[in-house]
Image: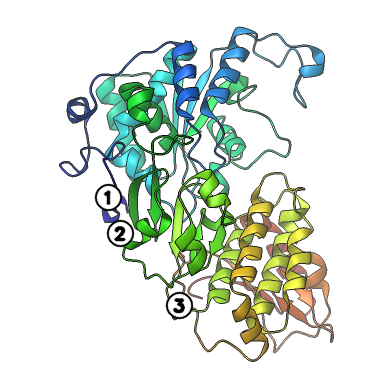
Amino acid sequence: MVSAVAVGHLGGPRLTLGFDRWERLDLERHLAVHGRLPTPDLDEVVAMAERAGLRGRGGAGFPFARKLAAVAARVAHPAADADALLPGETRGSRRPGADAVVVVNGAEGEPGSAKDKVLLCRAPHLVLDGAQIAASALGTRRIVVAVEDDAAARSVRAAIGERRMPARVVRLTERFISGESGAVVRAVNGEVPVPPGVKVRAAEAGVDGAPTLLSNTETFAQLAVLASLGPDLYASAGTADEPGTTLLTVGGARVVEVPYGTPLRTVLDACEVPPGDPVLVGGYHGEWLDAGGAARAVLSRAGMRAVGASVGAGIVLPLPAGTCPLGEAARVAAYLAAQSAGQCGPCRLGLPDVVRVMNGLCEGTAGVDELRRAAGIGRGRGACSHPDGTARFVLSAAEVFADDVELHRAGGCGRPTFGVLPLPVPDGSEGRVAIDWSRCDGHGLCAYLLPELIQLDRYGFPVVLGTDIPRWMERDARRAVAMCPALALRVTTGPR
């Protein structure tokens, strides 16, 4: 819950201005804190964003000015040559001259992130200011705010009502991949909310086939702050290359606004993270840093790149001493495998193989070379970046926790897995495959029907991958249960 998230800042607050006085800034409080909505034209917005180096805060870090200009160009010149048509598109299917759409991507499906929910719940008008500035610059009134959280949806709807603005709220399914741009567009269009198999730029054909400016919640809030302060004052915080501040979610339960250029260790000290703890930066598609890397890291693109990491979506997850790091990484890998859309080979077969090898590392029966092979099979071949991000996470874990890998090969590290890395709380409906060993005769049909979840050992008996059944596999799992000759296959639910 957002009310349980502590919010603070290092340096002067901008996005979090007023949070020390009010739990939520309604329109009156917002105007008192941030002033009235500025109305720069398109050229002014593009120039400001370029001068401030404003980039998306959702993880990819794409330059906002380029994205805005691409949408504007599509609106100004809707006609396209046949060679420029998108896959599956015809001249008749395109909507020439269609108004642009501005989409606030409030999907925060990653369990370790809370910054966008905090903004939507506590400063919704700042986010809507940014969306309105972009919409006015593009000459459109079509604004969509896509959210996953009930509290965020209520807060945004209330803010829209206060402003009497023609915007709508769309609820998204709470899944790890919900925030992928293609999945958001499909959800807004009323389609299955998974990444499309073919990459389609939202700026060219997004919501209802119209040019769409899609950025995450913090990006629009930053745009509002930039337009209010102006480029010079905005650049008074941060670095010359990366002006401004950014929001970090630390430990899943604390949101901190910090200027770019702040040492990561300064943030960790403020959050009372012991110096010796390894840290995951960038979330579950990010990279691990050991204590030395965390001490050298600086919160900027160049500063994080110097230690082999990235700021990403601003997620920082310390791993306290006492829990098994390989066990924690294996838990997350199993979660990521179950969260895939299952529409391409790297997700359907590659991610389960990664989970099997991660479990093998924990049991001391697999090595890092096996993990590299499993993680490398689908890299760059997925329908979205989910397989690549998962591979990055597990390979980074194997590198940073190399000593633990050796300990497990020698018999174990002696530490239990406490489950400190945040994952969704099970509601009891999650299904898992189980074997009734009093009935199983080793026919092997289950491994043929469910290769993603079941493999055969050297004696021909099934070995079950201990992960939740992905939604896209539920039908296949029921079919496999029905076809088991010995009636030994089960799908179980409830407590694990």
* Residue type, numbered disc 2: Ala
Name the residue nearer the viewer: 280 or 295: 295
**Residue closer to the observer: 144 or 419:** 419
Tell which residue pokes out farthest to the left in this image: 21
Residue at position x 50%, y 32% in the image: 215
Q: Earlier in the sequence, mark 1 or mark 3?
A: 1
Image coordinates of residue 461 in percent, x first then y, are: 79, 83
Distance CA(mark 1)–CA(mark 3):
28 Å
Report if residue 447 is visible in the image. yes
Q: Secondary structure at mark 3?
A: loop
Q: Which residue is mark 3?
A: 418
Instruction: Please say if 77 is above or below 458.
Output: above
* Above or below, comparing residue 332 to residue 116 in the picture: below
Mark 1 in CB contact with mark 2 (< 8 angstroms): yes
Mark 1 and mark 2 lie on one chain; the one further toward the N terminus is 1
Tell me which label, 2 or 3, sits earlier in the chain.
2
Residue at 77% over, 48% down: 381
What crowding class fits label 3: few (fewer than 14 Cα within 10 Å), some (14-19), or many (20 or more)? few
Q: Position of residue 116 (x, y in %)?
A: 39, 43
Q: Nearer the viewer, residue 167 or 350?
A: 350
Name the amino acid, label 3.
Phe
Per the image, the residue denoted by label 1 is 8
